[in-house]
Amino acid sequence: MATVLLLRHGRTTANATGELAGRRPVELDETGRAQAARVAGRLLGLPLAAVVSSPLIRCRQTVELALPGVTPVVDEGLTECGYGDWEGRPLKELAKEPLWPVVQQHPSAVTFPAGESMAGMSARAIASIRAWDDRVTSEHGPEAVWLACSHGDVIKAIVADAMGLHLDQFQRIVADPASITVIRYTPTRPFLVRVNDTGELASLVPKKSDGERSAEQSDAAVGGGAGGGV
């Protein structure tokens, strides 16, 4: 079976301000554009058999900068989770909602108000990735490499599936802006080859505490967050 590179879009204006972008037409900020441009060097020379993207503009902008001249195939299955009424709100405000701890600890039970269930998001994203992998393998052979550009929570759900984890464990996974996660599917099991690879180490240094309660340090950033570095 083929190997897929899961590329998360670069940092957006919403990431920078701590808002949940959701499916709004949020674009890359200056940092995000620089991140995406750096991805170009990391992909240089890779013979990509296919390039697929979420329809949202931040993913299409990322592909445009990371792979100049390449027009991705848009796949609705890779779009962001539908956060419904949560979209556009600050994450610090959302953290006070009764649903927040459920999102953190039992995401498989979550359906966002006027939005999508996390289980539904996971199922359609996994189905899309596996279908594309089958297609690429059939057309280009088991040694083929292809790329899919998507969103933080979507990528985390795909990784959880590849690792044989229940969706309730997916908040333990990190997918930073412009990171690359690599999965090789085989007839019997997937192999997680790389995860959250950004090619730099600066973001591993913890940020100074801003005085918030320590419990919040264990919470995952819904939507994927802004990452640790610039």
Image (cartoon, helix red, strand yellow):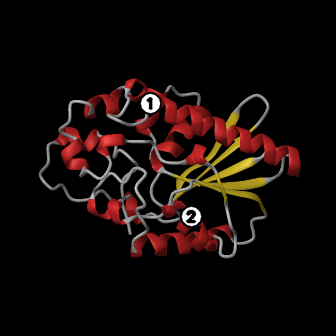
Amino acid found under the numbered disc labelled 2: Arg
The answer to whether residue 42 of the structure is visible from this angle is yes
Task: Judge whether 125 appears above or below 63 on screen.
Answer: above
In the image: residue 215, left or right of residue 6: left
Image spot of residue 223 (x, y percent) = 39, 47
Q: Disc 2 vs disc 1: which is toward the camera? A: 2
Write down the residue under mark 2. 60
* Residue 169 sits in quarter: top left
Q: Residue furthest front?
A: 114
Q: Residue at x 78, y 40 (%)?
A: 134
Image spot of residue 102 (x, y percent) = 30, 28
Task: Judge whether 41 appears above or below 6 on screen.
Answer: below
Q: Residue at x 33, y 61 (%)?
A: 14
Q: Residue at x 60, y 66 (%)?
A: 63
* Residue 202 sits in quarter: bottom left
> The N terminus lies in which quarter of the figure?
top right
Write down the residue under mark 1. 169
Residue 120 image label: none
Label 2: state its secondary structure.
helix
Image spot of residue 20 (x, y percent) = 33, 51
* Residue 126 sits in quarter: top right
Amino acid found under the numbered disc labelled 1: Gln
For the residues labelled 2 and 1, the Cα–Cα distance comes to 29 Å
Structural crowding at the residue carrying mark 2, measured as other residues with C-alpha within 10 Å and reported as few (<14), some (14–19) or many (≥20) = many
